[in-house]
Image (cartoon, grey):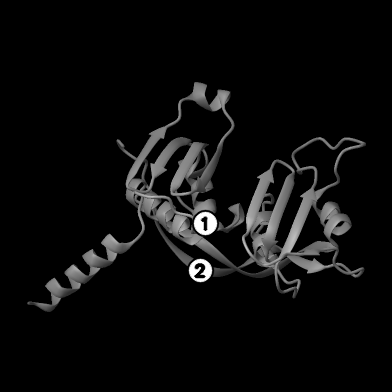
Amino acid sequence: MRLTAIIALALLAAAQTEPRFEVASVKPASPDEIAARTSGIKTGHGRATGTDVTLKRCIIGAYHIGPGQVIGGPAWLDTDRFHIEAEAAEPVDDDAVMDAMLRNLLADRFHLAVHRETRQLRALVLTVSKQGPKLEKGEGTGSATNAAHGSLELRNSTMDALAERLARSTDLPVINQTGLTGVFNLKLTWTPDLDTPKPDGPPSLSTALHEQLGLELKSKRAPVEVLVIDHAEKPTGN
């Protein structure tokens, strides 16, 4: 057998073993649907449901990065919205496998091609405040996330995972430089920057981190890993 044929067969075998959803539907969301529903994406137990989500939002979830770490892409990357329904052949409770399935779905349906780079960018560096951290140690088994507008609850979370989640609520990447190891149970409530602050409402994100967790965000230029969009197309059909 020729070498090129062997390589082709090896690549085909590798592609077939990559985790993929058994069935998947990707449809453009109509303006009426967008106005009537809350957008977001949920994954778990072998299912993924995206309601009025942009491709950029899917990339953020599949690659675990913040909005400021997505570079390039077509003009519609963060404007056009889609409804996604996907299901594996059997239940999947491994988060890493679910992430891989979602990345493969984006590659198959949006023809998404990306590569990683490290660039010097303005970022928010997460550090411990002078007064010390106010953190509850986790028990170390089973992680969970409950995120909403202006609130975040993490169970058995590392500081890297906290930084990743915070990056989704800011315009800049967030880099963990706390030096804290292990896992923690975290609760955080704040008033998002675009919301109108209320006298008796939650503080800003920076103040909330300081008061509630004993952590700080400092703006500085730093090396940041980014995801560069090489190619993407609008999906056609199901």
**Which residue corresponds to the image point at 74% horizontal and 39% vertical from the top-left?**
194
Vertical relation: 70 (above or below) 28:
below
Q: Amino acid at mark 1?
A: Ile
Label of residue 117 in the image: 2
Looking at the image, is 176 positioned above or below residue 238?
Answer: below
In the image: residue 64, left or right of residue 206: left
Q: Which label is found at residue 71?
A: 1
Residue positioned most to the top: 32
User: x, y (%) of residue 93?
Assistant: 49, 55
| SS under mark 2 | strand
Point out the residue furthest to the left here.
1
- Badge 2 amino acid: Glu
Which of the labelled discs sits on residue 185, or is there none? none
Q: Position of residue 23 (x, y in %)?
A: 33, 43
Residue 200 image point, x, y percent: 92, 37
CA separation in Å, label 2 and label 1? 10 Å
Q: If the image is split into quadrants, where does the N terminus sit?
A: bottom left
Is mark 2 in CB contact (under 8 Å) with mark 1? Answer: yes
Label located before the other in sequence (2 or 1): 1
User: Residue 15 appears in which quarter of the rendering?
Assistant: bottom left
Q: Which quarter of the rendered picture does the C terminus lie within?
A: top left
The answer to whether any part of residue 74 appears in the image is: no
Helix, strand or loop at disc 1?
strand
